[in-house]
Amino acid sequence: MRKTLFLLSSVALAATPVALSAQTASRGLSSRYVQDAQQQHPAVLQEFGGADTSQRGAYVEQVGRRVAAYSGVNPASFRYTTLNSAVENAFAVPGGYIYITRQLMGLMNDEAELAFVLGHETGHVAANHAQARQSASQRNAIGGILGSILGSVLGGGIGNIIGQLAQTQSQLSTLQFSRAQEYDADRLGIGYLNRAGYDPGASSTMLAALGRATALEARVQGQDSRSTPEWASTHPLSENRVAQASQMARQTGRVGTGLRNRDQFLNQLEGVFVDDDPAQGVIEGRMFTHPDLRLQFTVPTGYLMQNGSDAVSIQGSAGQAQFRASRYTGNLQSTITQRFQQLTGGRTQIQIVDSNRTTINGLPVEYAIARAQTSSGVVDVSVFAYAFDNDTAYDFTMLTRGGQGVGPFSSMVSSLRRIGAQEAAAIRPRVIDVYSVRTGDTPQSLAGRMAYRNYQLERFLSLNGLAANSRLVPGQRVKLVVYGQRR
């Protein structure tokens, strides 16, 4: 969650080579889908941390248009946006708006890999995949992170309407394409790469990089509390998919002969934020800290967090929760009432079973625990509201099985506290540093510079597509993740 929408500073479009002229006739996109995409765009930016309007964002736009010139659709129909999001993801909407996150860009090692991802998403639009799966689109519309999680867990009754709690405003459909459509988009993306002059082999190296990152994240999550939302997993990975992309690329006869533009890409990647932007709060292990809002809390062991645009969602085996802010007018009870109303929409009866006032870490607190009957059984709904300052209240809204009350979240509601200026100043962003290897450098020595407390070597190798026994050559450029300065 963040205090205000965070946008990177805007700079003029840099001069880069223009795309080769397309050899196919161009068609337009449906005006209805274009209008929908235009209307959804501001909400998408709000949901995913804002747009990168710097030279880097302009660079991504230009690469996207270069591959779109071979899609059979007028390249001017597409709009490519780089999002300030810590989720590794790229997605497209039918109206030609294509999005890629800075986190996904950080996995890439050259421009050709970027071009493949943008080409893949362009292929989804050009092939009308979304229209073919319109029903899936409707099912997967984002109505709030907590709603998408809890709706599937609880089902029916309060589980179906809990999406109102998040109020993300975003109506974007992040599509779960079929396996056949994913392979088709890979095929189209490889074709665009080839015709635009890029090395088509970048398709398989990019998919392999995603596979490595996914496998490493699965290991890291054993010690971390960061969760990737289901709606972000739009591109299921498999060894078969990597192998098929490699085979399709070889069939072009141009693997290893096209452009990779590694140096140009790495120059654009210098200084990119990795993981959380402190302006939106930072997840570190089981702890969430927001240096601008001057607050911190800790989730129970085994629970995962997902940092959203205006809320933090928490999920685990014994319950789900959300942390968010509201305007404080001197009455915490109004915050509690508002949360219950948003949760039920006035259509589900709830029974208050406990309420009280207390003080936690110097903060005035009021809470209420209610019980509701759902199609999946009895559910307890608890709201803890904290008076943080004269104008702001924060609250945890929690769902547990009937009879548990706050139960598994007891330690969490007791952990919320203010942090001081010194603690806030210590929160620094992780950024990519493009480093030129020197004599004597090894993967092990460079991994020691990575701004992580665990899996340093594994992260370094995965980030750079290297094997554990790789030998580095002086002058070789590699990516490090180091602590940077806030902007």
Image (cartoon, grey):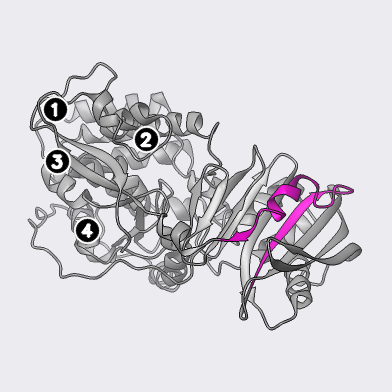
Residue under label 2: 210
Give left or right: position of 64 versus 289: left
Question: Dot 3: within a 10 Å radius of its alpha carbon, few (fewer than 14), some, or many (20 or more) residues?
Answer: some
* Front: mark 4 or 2: 4
Residue under label 4: 56
Marks 3 and 4 in Cβ contact (< 8 Å): no
Report which quarter residue 296 is drawn in. bottom right
Q: Earlier in the sequence, mark 4 or mark 2?
A: 4
Q: Position of residue 322 (x, y in %)?
A: 65, 57
Task: Note whether residue 348 is visible.
Answer: no
Marks 4 and 1 sit apart, C-alpha to C-alpha, by 32 Å
Marks 1 and 2 in Cβ contact (< 8 Å): no
Give left or right: position of 122 versus 141: left
Q: Earlier in the sequence, mark 1 or mark 2?
A: 2
Kind of residue at badge 2? Leu
Residue under label 1: 253
Judging from the image, what secondary structure is the residue with disc 2 in?
helix
